[in-house]
Image (cartoon, grey):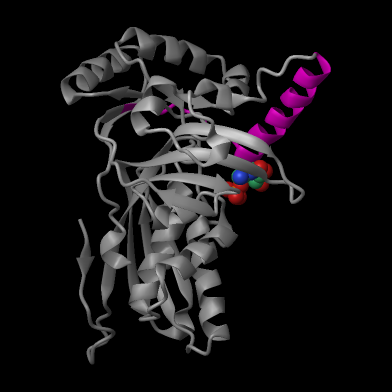
Amino acid sequence: MVHHSGSTENLLGCSEKITLNAPAKLNLYLEVLGKRSDGYHNLCSLFQMVGLYDSLSMTEVAVSKGLALKVEGVSGEISLAADASNLVLRAANLLQKEMQEAGFPARGARIHLMKKIPISAGMGGGSSDAAATLIGLNRLWSLGWSCEKLAELGGQIGSDLPFFFYGPTAWVSGRGEVVEPVSQVLEGIFLLVHPPFAVSTAAVFKAYEQARTQERENGNIELTNAATHLSIPLDVGLKPLAEEILRHPHNDLEKVTLSAHPVLKEIKVLLKSLGSECVLMSGSGPSLFAYFEDSDAANVAALQMEKHGHRVSVVPTLKQSPFKDFL
Ligand code: C5P
């Protein structure tokens, strides 16, 4: 749901408020192509927005009040600071710096973030929140900047951000900055499993490199050539259809995270036993998803997972990005 009133601050000092729903993403396919000279990795990944959202409300305040962030909805052991390290404030600060360099006057904003997407879980929640911040403040501050410009700024904050300007479904490559939207929309339901711990993306990529070095020394290339998992070679620019991906789900980072957290292997086995043929970890994990064609089957499987003590969500694939109305 989207609320947007078109005026700026009125005479009584009541400010415009913009509310955006920031969706989670899943990586239906993720291949690591190799390490780059800047330390990042070139990837080839199919990103899909799904119906699990954080919510961000932004209100203009006096410029003297600067930028303020309030975070709600975070419970349990995984914390999320509301300080300058938060991707929302990093996005707001970057936008403010850029607009001042472009000759716009400084503006202030109060941002309220309600978290629902698990943190550091491979579902892009922080990236989606930061993208929502750039998109929302672009409106609130009447900058009129293009989707392309905002996506480029987003890419400076995190590799997963550019996708969120072009979803709901897209092939993502390079470090994350090359986004090719897929017009054919994937339909279906995902059962998500939310393990009660966070995973550091940087640590997963590091472990992936170590494992690759080890595999090479052992003469085993299992971790290195994910393209063999698909019938169409990825390097000729022919991207397989989503259906093909669902038949051959693959994530190069999965082996690393599953080795570090064996409970994830047990969850995968359980999910497969509940009738999904497409069960995979998203991003660097630890979230796992199982694809179902219909919601009844997904709900039955969800109940079973809950009986086994797992936290789950049942969400649809998104046919349209909730950011579309703001771009
Ligand atoms: O870009 P972001 O800050 O989200 O990346 C977190 C970490 O994940 C990076 O510091 C890097 O170690 C790793 N990464 C990578 N290649 C990518 C994306 C992320 O190596 N394409």
Q: Residue at x 56, y 22 (%)?
A: 228
Left or right of 313 in this view: 231: right
Task: Give the x, y percent position of residue 102.
Answer: 54, 85
Task: Give the x, y percent position of residue 230.
Answer: 49, 24
**Residue furthest toward the bottom?**
11
Magenta span dominant secondary structure: helix
Q: Is residue 198 magenta?
A: yes
In the rendered view of the protein, which quadrant contains the N terminus?
bottom left
**Residue furthest toward the left?**
296
Give, as a single range, the part of the protein colored magenta: 191-218
User: In the image, is residue 74 above or below residue 294?
Assistant: below
**Residue furthest toward the right?**
217
Q: Is residue 54 magenta?
A: no
Q: Is residue 280 visible?
A: yes
Q: Residue at x 28, y 84 (%)?
A: 8
In front here: 171 or 105? 171
User: In the image, is residue 303 above or below residue 224?
Assistant: above
Give ligand 1's quarter of the image: top right
Q: Residue at x 23, y 92 (%)?
A: 11
Task: Give the x, y percent position of residue 29.
Answer: 47, 31
Task: Give the x, y percent position of residue 219.
Answer: 79, 14
User: In the image, is residue 116 above or below residue 208?
Assistant: below
In front here: 75 or 321? 321
Left or right of 244 in this view: 203: right
Q: Residue at x 52, y 33 (%)?
A: 30
In the rendered view of the protein, which quadrant contains the C terminus?
bottom left
Q: Is residue 199 visible?
A: no
In front here: 103 or 225? 225
What is the tally of numbered marks visible in this picture? 0
